[in-house]
Amino acid sequence: MDSQRTIKLLSSLNRKAIELDRFVDALPVAQDLPGLKRAVYVLRTEISDNLRTPDSMAMDRVERLRIMIGEISAFSTSMALRNDVRPAEGMATPLSAAQILESRCVSLNNNTLGLEIGLNRVAPEDIAKHIPGQKIAAFQFAFGDGRLVLQPQTDATLPGDEAVAASARELLIEEGFRLLGELQTSNCGPRLISAFSLLQGKIEAGNDVVQIGMRVRTADAALRASSDEFAASQFAILAAHLLNISHYLAQFPAWQRFAENAAGVALSDEDLTSLRSTSRALASYLRERPNLADAAVPEALETVSVWAADSAELDGKVILALARTLENLWSLVVRGVVAVRDELVKEGRKRVAAGIIALVVSACATFAPSMAQIPGAEWINATFDYVQALLP
């Protein structure tokens, strides 16, 4: 492997190890877990040693790094870390230190995949094993009749909460219908009416909770921007409706997991612009090629880019809605390219996949490194050069 690429990969790994070290240092229970601090120190020392001799990087060193990361991850079972919880915006259940530690270890392991690929120890079918399935996101994708289509998401409540959730949804639909009717006959702006109309449609359509959650956020922003158009009592009624929807969403584990993952997500302006541009480029590409994708696919890609562009208060949920949607699309199409020996992967799917990947490679050069800033999506940057080399 080229030494400069090795240094780049190890430097990224080192940066994350330093962040992990700071996280562990700040834990109130750190003094009760000396083994955790020592394990992080050993990992940082190993990474530093490899950075000093990048030309000597070999598979046994990669395996050693993974073992060390695994030893750190094992501490996520500690009751001290499980009991160390902190509030997280948008969640009924706080995030535990154990969950954060486990997430950081997954991110570190994703970086070691790039080292393994660089050592030419991974075949196409091996790459496929590292590609995740469709993750909880605003949109998921699938192939239908050789074209890209949206994959329906029906999210379940916790066992025993089904009747309560169904009753709450019925009341929300009824109240939303009434409020939307009042808005449509008022003097408020079209943006607010559109936001409440789209939200109402999502609640009526089913339990795609991430999309509902994002629509709540959009409606809340539009309502606050129009606050001077309403009497205080009218504003309070509309705001209470949105709050009730948020309480309804809290009954769904899928929304809880999405909120947990979003809690620690942040991007620079440059990386966010890169992902928005990629999403819009893909939307334009697929909109012009209805033989490759159903019309709902480019509409979904345009939607998440608009959420990220129009948000007055950008937060982790908006960023993750955009990034996870792109990750889901990328994981689906990459499988169509790397599974070269899989007879079940039809040529039509491979053609769709190759076209999308070629577009991203040629027009969205910063997509992969920008996605590497999203916890759990580092595999994209790690496999990007490899996938690019497989294009015809």
Image (cartoon, grey):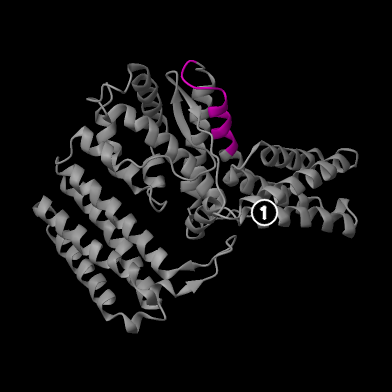
Label 1: how many residues lie within 10 Å, few (<14), some (14-19) or many (20+)?
few
Task: Tell me: residue 58, above or below residue 286.
Answer: below
User: Amino acid under label 1?
Assistant: Val
Q: Residue at x 32, y 40 (%)?
A: 131
As for residue 298 lying within the magenta part, the answer is yes
Quadrant of the image containing the C terminus = top left
Image side of residue 386 versus residue 210, left or right? left
Q: Is residue 16 left or right of residue 124?
A: right
Residue in the foreground of this view, choosing between 3 and 196: 196
Q: Would you identify the image quadrant in which residue 119 lies?
A: top left
At horizontal 47% and vertical 60% (from top left) the residue drawn is 264
**Res. 83 image quadrant:** bottom left
Above or below, 311 against 233 in this view is above
Report the residue at 26% width, 57% height from top.
11
Query: Count the marks: how many?
Result: 1
Residue 369 horizontal/vertical position (percent): 37, 45
Secondary structure under the numbered disc 1 in the rendered image: helix
Residue drawn at the location 33% of the way across and 56% of the way down: 106
Q: Is residue 48 left or right of residue 133?
A: left
Q: Can residue 366 be seen in the rendering of this structure?
A: no
Q: Which residue is mark 1?
A: 164
Q: Which residues are magenta?
A: 291-303
Position of 149 with respect to 345 (left or right) is: right
> Is residue 195 shown above or below 229?
above
